[in-house]
Amino acid sequence: MADRPLLALATYHALPGKEKEFVSLIRAHWPVLSRRGLVTARRPVLGRSASTPGVFVEVFEWKSPVAVERAHRDPEVQRIWNAMALISAKPAATLARLPECEGPFPNFQILDPNAAFTDGKDGAAAPAGKKPARRPAARPAARARK
């Protein structure tokens, strides 16, 4: 049993005005854990609280309890975690403190882990089966005939 994967439910609370920077760190987090051999191949799911500004959740799988211990000693992982801590609100957000979690089925806005993050509102995944709308290419102006 000790070598089985563990499900991680990480809750983060970015300081006001630091959400963009924080999401960049969250998006860098799993690739570092993966490179270091600490997580399974299952991609993480990122979410945002609808009730509490600046609160994000990350769900991923550690390879094992030993991998969790290794992460706490890994300098590359610690750099990311320390950068997150510098822009985290205190006290830290916990699932128990979020209104979404008062019932048995909490829901969070899903963030696309590959989307560009340009302000505090974007990064939500597009609805299933829908592609982002494209602007039509500008057509050259017709030339007047002489």
Image (cartoon, helix red, strand yellow):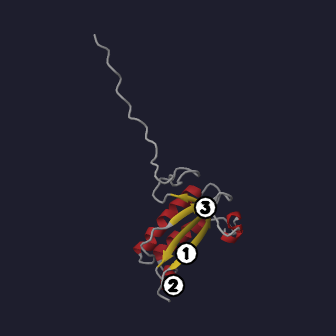
* Residue 108, disc: 3
* First of labels 1, 2 by sequence position: 1
Q: Which quadrant: the C terminus?
A: top left
Residue 36 image point, x, y percent: 42, 76
Query: Do the residues under discs 1 and 2 have CB atoms within 8 angstroms?
Result: no
Is 132 left, or right, of 110 in this rendering? left
Crowding at mark 2 (Cα within 10 Å: few <14, some 14-19, many 20+) = some
Query: Do the residues under discs 3 and 2 have CB atoms within 8 angstroms?
Result: no
* First of labels 3, 1 by sequence position: 1
* Residue 65, disc: 2
Task: Classify 8 as above or below 55.
Answer: below
Disc 2 marks which amino acid? Answer: Pro
Residue 16 visible here: yes
* First of labels 3, 2 by sequence position: 2
Residue 32 image point, x, y percent: 44, 70
Identify which residue is drawn at 71% across, 68% down. Answer: 102
Crowding at mark 3 (Cα within 10 Å: few <14, some 14-19, many 20+) = some
* Residue 8, disc: 1
Residue 103 image point, x, y percent: 70, 68
Viewer-nearest residue: 144 or 86: 144
Identify which residue is drawn at 43% across, 68% down. Answer: 31
Crowding at mark 1 (Cα within 10 Å: few <14, some 14-19, many 20+) = some
